[in-house]
């Protein structure tokens, strides 16, 4: 998800721009939400890095600011002087075109700058950005910067959750959020099959990996109207699901038996312990009717086999998702504790694993320059997830959105929706 383009070159159309009249307001709201999410954190909280996959909250706040400073202020604001000459080395993510940078695993070593200094950096860049927000030639990159920061808002929440989970005290980041009744709808959503158009339709913002729009042939299928729940996962565990080799892919069986980097065999979703689970509000009793989350692709695939069904392809999910309101369901609306709950929407609560490898669509070509590094170079060894989660800023996702992670990763809000052939 980390991203920051240098120059879109001759193919800036790969990142569609939203309506210009709302851009400045959306920029300010996005920047404010990031700081609201980080507001409960101490300087020490914001500095910790629990694993290489995660980054410190302070780094997320600075990296998203570096994006706007580098690709808008530095390149498009005459006379602009960098806030700090060494910040590009500290806060570049993985962009070779932007030169050397601190190693990803070492981000947690950055005790300086302090959280207060990072917030000052944000204020300075935000003030300088005001002159660019209404410029037509900057709109495309402002839109990309907003979408980029929204991705990092979700990462900030999931990364700090993993960090606080390492503390034996089980500290809470937020007070317990409001609990909602689940709105499950039972049954299946059927699709007759046939030729479907997949990919972004060209209206509004989209990342380059969402296109080009193309045709796929679907056989008749159905998706479950609801996500798999904690109660169902308990039944899977009680039936020996984690110890039945026939349910697991070969790589998954190796992973569940210790080849996972998590310090031993896997026997439950991440953050589960007894009847409790770790949340942004600390340890809480686990709701059996809430969607199961923080599971790997391997776990999702094994459960689907146990249930006598399968995971959907990304194309099956998208063909039905095109008929839904992508801003619906359980998604992030403010700086509060997040916890998945069941809703009738295909979107929200948990990102949903598909059985589709993350690969380029027909006729996909990376954009010239560093913007081509945003998504294209990661099209190997990962699987696509669809929908959105309770930590995804509302309005960020859409049916064509392609999230992607390695099959063993599960610190994100990842869950599953079953599919079947009909």
Image: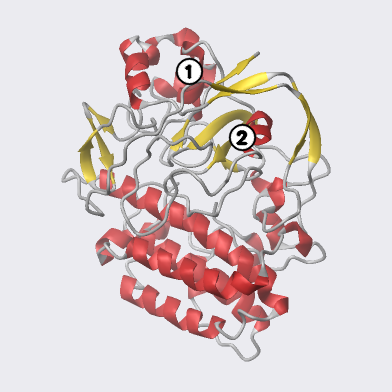
Left or right: 308 in relation to 34: right
**Where is residue 217 shown, x and y percent of the image?**
79, 26
Up the image or down, 91 lies above or below 184; here it is: below
Label 1: which secondary element? helix
Q: Nearer the viewer, mark 1 or mark 2?
A: 1
Q: Is residue 225 visible?
A: yes
Q: How many marks?
A: 2
Q: What's the residue at 71%, 52% (across, down)?
A: 208
Residue 84 showing in the rendered view? no
**Residue 330, position as x, y percentages in the image:** 43, 44
Q: Secondary structure at mark 2?
A: loop
Rounded to the nearest angstrom, the CA distance separating label 1 from label 2 is 19 Å
Residue picked out by circle 2: 381
Quick check: 189 left or right of 76? left
Q: Which residue bears the numbered disc 1?
A: 302
In the image shown, does 305 or 177 lie closer to the viewer?
A: 177
In this picture the colour scheme is secondary structure
The mark found on residue 160 in the picture is: none
Label 1: few (<14), some (14–19) or many (≥20) C-alpha neighbours in 10 Å: many
* Of callouts 1 and 2, the N-terminal one: 1
Residue at the farthest left position: 169
């Amino acid at each position: 998800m980390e991203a920051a383009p240098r120059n879109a070159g001759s193919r800036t159309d790969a990142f569609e721009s939203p309506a210009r009249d709302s851009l400045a307001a959306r920029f300010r709201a996005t920047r404010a939400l990031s700081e609201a999410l980080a507001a409960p954190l101490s300087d020490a909280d914001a500095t910790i890095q629990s694993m290489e996959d995660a980054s410190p909250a302070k780094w997320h706040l600075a990296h998203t600011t570096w994006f706007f400073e580098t690709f808008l202020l530095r390149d498009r604001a005459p006379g602009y002087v960098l806030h700090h000459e060494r910040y590009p080395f500290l806060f570049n993510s993985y962009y070779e075109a932007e030169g050397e940078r601190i190693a990803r695993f070492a981000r947690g070593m950055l005790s300086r700058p302090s959280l207060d200094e990072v917030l000052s950096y944000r204020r300075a860049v935000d003030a300088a950005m005001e002159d660019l927000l209404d410029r037509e030639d900057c709109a495309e990159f402002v839109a990309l910067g907003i979408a980029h920061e929204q991705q990092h808002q979700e990462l900030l929440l999931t990364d700090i959750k993993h960090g606080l989970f390492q503390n034996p005290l089980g500290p809470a980041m937020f007070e317990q959020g409001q609990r909602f009744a689940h709105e499950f709808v039972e049954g299946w959503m059927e699709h007759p099959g046939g030729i479907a158009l997949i990919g972004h339709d060209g209206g509004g913002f989209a990342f380059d990996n969402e296109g080009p729009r193309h045709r796929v042939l679907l056989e008749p299928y159905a998706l479950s109207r609801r996500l798999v729940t904690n109660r169902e996962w308990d039944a899977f565990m009680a039936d020996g699901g984690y110890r039945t080799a026939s349910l697991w892919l070969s790589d998954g069986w190796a992973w569940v038996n210790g080849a996972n980097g998590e310090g031993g065999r896997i026997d439950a979703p991440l953050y589960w312990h007894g009847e409790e689970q770790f949340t942004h509000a600390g340890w809480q009793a686990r709701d059996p009717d809430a969607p199961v989350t923080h599971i790997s692709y391997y776990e999702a695939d094994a459960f689907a086999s146990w249930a006598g069904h399968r995971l959907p392809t990304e194309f099956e999910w998208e063909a039905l998702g095109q008929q839904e309101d992508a801003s619906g369901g359980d998604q992030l609306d403010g700086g509060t504790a997040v916890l998945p709950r069941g809703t009738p929407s295909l979107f929200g609560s948990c990102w949903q694993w598909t059985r589709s490898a993350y690969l380029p669509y027909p006729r996909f070509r990376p954009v010239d320059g560093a913007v081509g590094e945003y998504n294209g170079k990661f099209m190997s060894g990962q699987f696509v997830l669809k929908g959105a989660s309770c930590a995804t800023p509302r309005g960020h996702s859409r049916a064509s959105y392609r999230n992607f992670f390695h099959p063993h990763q599960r610190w994100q809000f990842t869950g599953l929706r079953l599919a079947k052939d009909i």
